Amino acid sequence: MISQHTIQQILSRIDIVEIVGSYVKLKKRGINYLGLCPFHNEKSPSFTVSANKEIFKCFGCGKSGNAIGFLMELEKYSYVEALRWLANKYGVEVEETAVSPEVVAQRQVADSLYIINTFAQKFFEDKLFNSEEGQDIGLSYLKERGFREEVLKKFQVGYSLQDSQSFVSTALNAQYNIDLLVKSGLVAQRDGRSYDNYRGRIIFPVHNQSGKIIGFGARVIGKVERAPKYINTPENELYLKSKILYGSYQARQAIDKLDECLLVEGYTDVVSLHQAGIENVVASGGTSLTPDQLRLVHKYTNNLTIIYDGDGAGVKAALRGLELALTEGLNVQLVLIPDNEDPDSYVNKVGAAAFQEFIKNNKKEFIIFQLEVMLKDAGSDTNKKAAVVNQMAETISKLNKAEDFTKQQDYIRRCSEMLRIEETGFTNLVNKFIREKITKEGQQQQKQQYNNPQQRTNKGGNQQAPPQQPGPNNFNAVPTGEDGFFPEDTFYAEDDSWDQGSFPDAGQGQLLPPAPGDDTLALLTRDDQNEKELIRVLLEHGNKPWEDASTVASFVIAEVIENQLLDNPEYMRIVEFYKTWYEAGLEPGMKSFLYHEDQTLSALVIQIMDFPYEVSKKWAEVLEQGSFKEEEAKHLLPVNSAIHYLKLRKIKRLLEENQRDMSKPHSSEELMVLIQTHAHLKQLEIELTKKLGTVILK
């Protein structure tokens, strides 16, 4: 884990305008900045960045967050990956909490490989564009293939000279370790001699999701007998082929914006399509898709379109591993390029517009495509047809998510028609595979629980019940009031009866909330707004001075805890976090929560900061002329105002409770105590009302 000291160092350097501005062209508008939203297509800018609050918000699509949230959403980083990206940007050395020596050694190797790969990429790119051999052989070949220099530089393409000592001698002279050079795959050894592994080849760097080079693909020029077309980096601490999609770094934003990923086979296919303006494309490198690669696609979109060669090998490659895509919940479609072309040659042949039109008009759903191919292979063989029926039923059974039910039923209908079999029987066969899968998973779960007894018991040693889920006979999962019954204001629509053992269908016995009017909504949100204001005051002014040489934080925390002023448990959670850090000698502020690793907490703070009001000029003049000085008014007034309001709310609740007690039978002594309590509370209410006064907001 990254240490808190490092996190604070990173957060203190963050400039949200600089970070967002590296992706979005921003123009200053008043105190904020305005630009076109990177998360959806728009012509008029609705994307706003606040430098003061360190947040962004798009009024078109509704996305909002902080600088880290921006990177996580746009680049699909995890929280830790975003922190590391920022640390690298601002030159902050990352300190980590105690880790094992093995992990430290592994990370040191990984960091060294990153450095070597960066050095190698610059070396190969320089040889492609600036050496005589690179220009005559490498660059001329690429230009012959239709590649322009700008797209080659975009993908950092290079060339390895035919001299077997060109790279290795340069790297060793630069003091790079020979063992790490071999591990990187850039250098090979034979009979005690080291030589360049990729000599005479075009070099395609492979990037990870943050743009760092993790490996290379080296393509032969022309056709060479008894030599592989590509040599790829061997698997090491950085390069794991099953987790890589070539071009995903360059394509990430286009995929996210267009909500579709195009998958091709080779590196040159990706580069060619980018050159043609089709940027939402990645390559599998010719291997069957793996779960990790599919999850990488799923980070950006649910829609995957596979574009492969139309020959037999292309068809088989397209079908390999695609059932995994269904399990991942992806919508998979396929397009086969005609006339023995590949995407690279076809887009150069027909042009970008015609290529995109062809893709649009020739998409086939994976399941239907698979059935067509299998039926063609089966011909008139009855046994092969029977195998096809079983295979298709098993494939359709993998659409097992609730939202896939309609799609599953449609596939059953269409496949049964193509197979010329009874739909009911085919449905039963699909259900058979579903039941077998559920039974198998249940047996595996029981086996795991048997092998791990601690998972079956709680801390007291008792059998642990599974978590309850909403269902027909589980009334504990139904929302209830404080006394265990349904809230008083809920009612049933159309029908007040329940079918035994089941929840009512929509429109029949459905539990509906009352429709509140504007006044009711204002009443419901008023208390929450004031609690929110107190938290905002704490985060914004907590470290500022208060009376008796204390701070605003010490005053607010004491008042909140002693008087139980907050109803909202999420706001109370912020206070408790603040108290823990404050007592540890830290000075927590807005940034500590704004960039908290708990994204729920961070989102709540962003919502709290989005305060739509400011003190009016008239009220500011009153403050300057009165007992408050301008600097004091910035935090003393809102602190007192928020605390006094919540105290007043507490007193009113106590008054109501006391009045309810007075309406019940009591002895004369008990009644006298209640009357005195009422008088005391009334006096406190009057004093607080005078202190509270009225603050005018615009």
Image: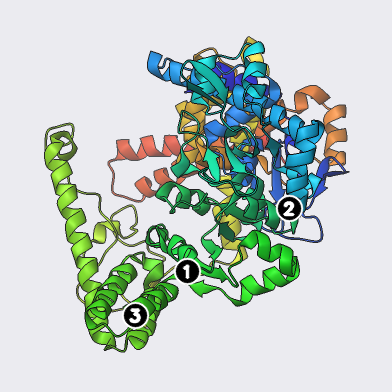
Could you tell me which residue is drawn at 56 percent across and 61 percent down? 520
Q: CA distance from mark 3 to mark 1?
A: 41 Å
Q: Secondary structure at mark 1?
A: loop
Q: Which residue is mark 2?
A: 37
The amino acid pointed to by label 3 is: Ile
Does any portion of residue 358 appear in the rendered image?
Answer: yes
Could you tell me which residue is drawn at 63 percent across and 36 percent down? 211
Q: Earlier in the sequence, mark 3 or mark 1?
A: 3
Q: CA distance from mark 1 to mark 2?
A: 37 Å
Percent across and percent down for residue 232 are 52, 38
Q: Earlier in the sequence, mark 3 or mark 2?
A: 2
Q: Secondary structure at mark 2?
A: loop
Percent across and percent down for residue 310 are 53, 69
Q: Which residue is mark 3?
A: 412
Image mark count: 3
Could you tell me which residue is drawn at 59 percent across and 27 percent down? 84
**Residue 514, label in figure:** 1
Q: Are marks 1 and 2 in contact (CB under 8 Å)?
A: no
Front-lying residue, 273 or 444 = 273
Give the left or right position of residue 612, taking residue 649 as reference.
right
Give the left or right position of residue 434, taking residue 28 as reference.
left
Q: Are marks 3 and 1 in contact (CB under 8 Å)?
A: no
Front-lying residue, 158 or 647 = 158
Q: Secondary structure at mark 3?
A: helix
